[in-house]
Image (tube, rainbow, N blue to C red):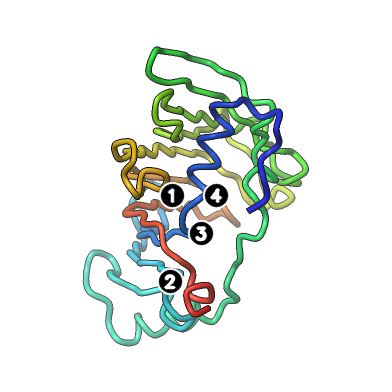
Amino acid sequence: MPALRADTPPLLHDAVGNWLAGKEDWALTQRTRVLADDGSVKEERLERYDPSLPDNQRWHLLEVDGKPPTEAQRKAIEVRKNQRPRKHANKPPEDFLDFTHAVPLHETPQAVTYAVTVRPEAARLVQTEKLIILVTVGRESHSIERITASLSEPMRVALGLAKITDVDLDMHFEPEPAGHPGAAEPDPSGTARISLSKFGDRMEYEWTAFKRVTPYAAAKR
């Protein structure tokens, strides 16, 4: 993993380094809702994504509209999604998030909360200034304890073809006691949600049940 820039605030520098020192990817559960104009749910899917599994098993359809999927539904979703190229997170997070210019917003004897911005060059065509990201770091643990993200107002993406109307991310990390083997890489608890409008369709995505895993290709080495 490339080193963080030395001029990153020291406490945040240590916390991000500790967070990234463990395994490389995340398994998660994704809920997708397609909404009608009146806000009612037209379609809802619940899926599990696990990059530690082989390519043809990464996505697993759990429910469709609150019921177990039929074999036809399962094949239609899983085959399509599992045929997509596997994405590799080759770039370090500091290529996307500007930790160097993070600003302390709130400090207590136990923790410091930093405001972190997205690098504009890392998200072209996205109004990154409307995205508010807060990272809370424990003074004693030197670990990230909470990450939140929200929008100050809706923002357009993809040349205006889509609009993100709401972002609600609130992730908590519970560090193990000092000296515990897993202290540097806790799994988060919490939920991430995003609402958007794309080609006239209103959609909501919700991610839960996060777990750090080793990607399948790396695990085989």
Q: CA distance from mark 4 to mark 3?
A: 31 Å
Where residue 68 sits: x, y (%)? Answer: 22, 74
Task: Report the Cα–Cα distance between label 4 and label 2.
Answer: 31 Å
* Residue carrying label 3: 24
Q: Residue at x 30, y 40 (%)?
A: 176
Q: Nearer the viewer, mark 4 or mark 3?
A: 3
Crowding near the residue tagged with mark 3, few <14, some 14–19, many ≥20 C-alpha atoms within 10 Å: some
Which is more foreground, mark 4 or mark 2? 2
* Picture coordinates of residue 113, whole percent (x, y): 48, 22
Q: Amino acid at mark 1?
A: Asp
Contact between labelled residues 1 and 4, with CB atoms less than 8 Å apart: no
- The answer to whether the residue labelled 2 contacts the one labelled 1, judged by CB atoms less than 8 Å apart, is no
The three-letter amino acid code for the residue at tag 4 is Ser
| Image position of 83 with respect to 25: above or below | below
Q: Nearer the viewer, residue 38 or 155?
A: 155
SS category of the residue bearing label 1: loop
Residue with the mark numbered 4:
197
At label 2, counting other C-alpha atoms closer than 10 Å, the crowd grade (few under 14, some 14-19, many 20 or more) is many
In the picture, the disc for residue 52 is: 2
Residue at the spot of label 1: 37
Please give left or right for residue 44 compared with residue 118 in the image. left
- Gap between marks 2 and 3 measured at Cα: 10 Å
Which of marks 1 and 4 precedes in the sequence? 1
Mark 4: secondary structure: strand
Report the amino acid beneath label 2.
Ser
Instruction: Give yes or no for contact between labels 1 and 3 (Cβ–Cβ under 8 Å).
Output: no
